[in-house]
Image (tube, rainbow, N blue to C red):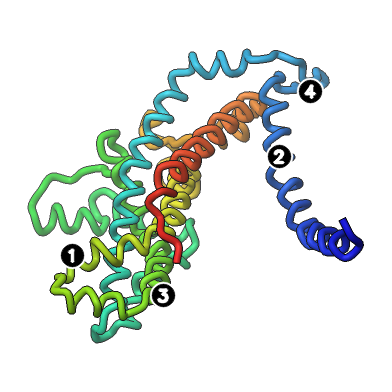
Amino acid sequence: MNRASAQVQIHGWLLLLPAAALLALFTHYPALATLWHSLHSTPKGVRPAVWVGLDNYRGLVEDPVFWQVLGNNLWFAAGTIPASIALALLMAVWVNGKISGRGFLRLAYFTPTVLPMIAVANIWLFFYTPTYGLLEQFTVGLLGLPSHNWLGTKSTVLSCLIVVTIWKEAGFFMIFYLAALQAIPPSLGEAAAIEGAGRWYCFRRVTFPLLMPTTLFVLVNAVINSFRLVDHIVVMTRGGPDNASSLLLYYIYDVGFKFWDSAYASTLTMVLLAILGTAAILQFAFLERRIHYR
């Protein structure tokens, strides 16, 4: 290796050093530290933490609340991910066309994204309030249905949180789809139209395949978001009733900061990291072959 080549490589590594240092300090080190704490007991006062090996993981397997929370989170992910992505794509296609009030529609769709999470939770808390909430005014006042405690009933509380999350996230994902649609050359659609392709066929065979890189990016973010919801639960339900709306990250928050069991909270965190890591690997493994990068 000559002197010039060595200088180029050193210069490249020096440029990467700040980002690598931040990644190691705020991502890799916390993950390893969490793994280390999950293999120890929780320190209590003057009693230090001791090595317990996999005891915390065995306790996790036998914890019925964990399995209930994990089931809630899987249902929550199944309800929010496809709906928010499909709605975001539909909105992006609509506001990308030549329609009147297009700028206002884009602003209206994106507004929920810029609202603080706590503010959104309080807005929807009013919607779901029994007797005088906005939803009750419609179901009881207009339809004549009996009053219902939407956030206090096990059968409806998780669905209510799913609706709030879709409303909050769809506008955010729409921005990425809108940017991707505007980057597609119009000549491709014009060529398809000349060949006699309809609008739906053109979208399915031309537009959507070119949107796959954006879809992969949005999908990864949607999966992560579905497992990191805490704010709405704290304000709206606090995990109730009977843990029916408790999700995995909120359960970690409860165990770590309400019960002060840092070792078990670390164990739950490692499970959450394993779920997200596995989901990301599967997404890249199955979708990468379908992605066309221009």
**Residue 201: image tag:** 1
The amino acid type, in three-letter code, at marker 3 is Ala
In the structure shown, which secondary structural element does the residue marked by tag 3 occupy? helix
The amino acid type, in three-letter code, at marker 2 is Pro
Badges 1 and 4: C-beta atoms under 8 Å apart?
no
Residue displayed at 29% across by 52% down: 83
**Residue 30: image tag:** 2
Residue displayed at 34% across by 48% down: 80
**Residue 286: image tag:** none
Structural distance between the alpha carbons of marks 1 and 4? 67 Å
The residue closer to the viewer here, 211 or 82, is: 211
- On-image quarter of the C terminus: bottom left
Structural distance between the alpha carbons of marks 4 and 3? 59 Å
Instruction: Mark yes or no: residue 250 visible.
Output: no
Badges 4 and 2: C-beta atoms under 8 Å apart?
no
Say which label, 4 or 2, has the lower sequence index. 2
The amino acid type, in three-letter code, at marker 1 is Tyr
The amino acid type, in three-letter code, at marker 4 is Gly
The image position of residue 125, as x and y in percent, is 36, 53
Structural distance between the alpha carbons of marks 4 and 2? 23 Å
Say which label, 1 or 4, has the lower sequence index. 4
Badges 2 and 3: C-beta atoms under 8 Å apart?
no
In the structure shown, which secondary structural element does the residue marked by tag 1 occupy? helix
In the structure shown, which secondary structural element does the residue marked by tag 4 occupy? loop
The image position of residue 159, as x and y in percent, is 29, 43
Residue receiving disc 4: 45
Residue receiving disc 3: 183
Badges 4 and 3: C-beta atoms under 8 Å apart?
no
- On-image quarter of the N terminus: bottom right
Q: Nearer the viewer, mark 1 or mark 2?
A: 1
Q: Is residue 142 left or right of residue 240?
A: left
Q: Nearer the viewer, mark 2 or mark 3?
A: 3
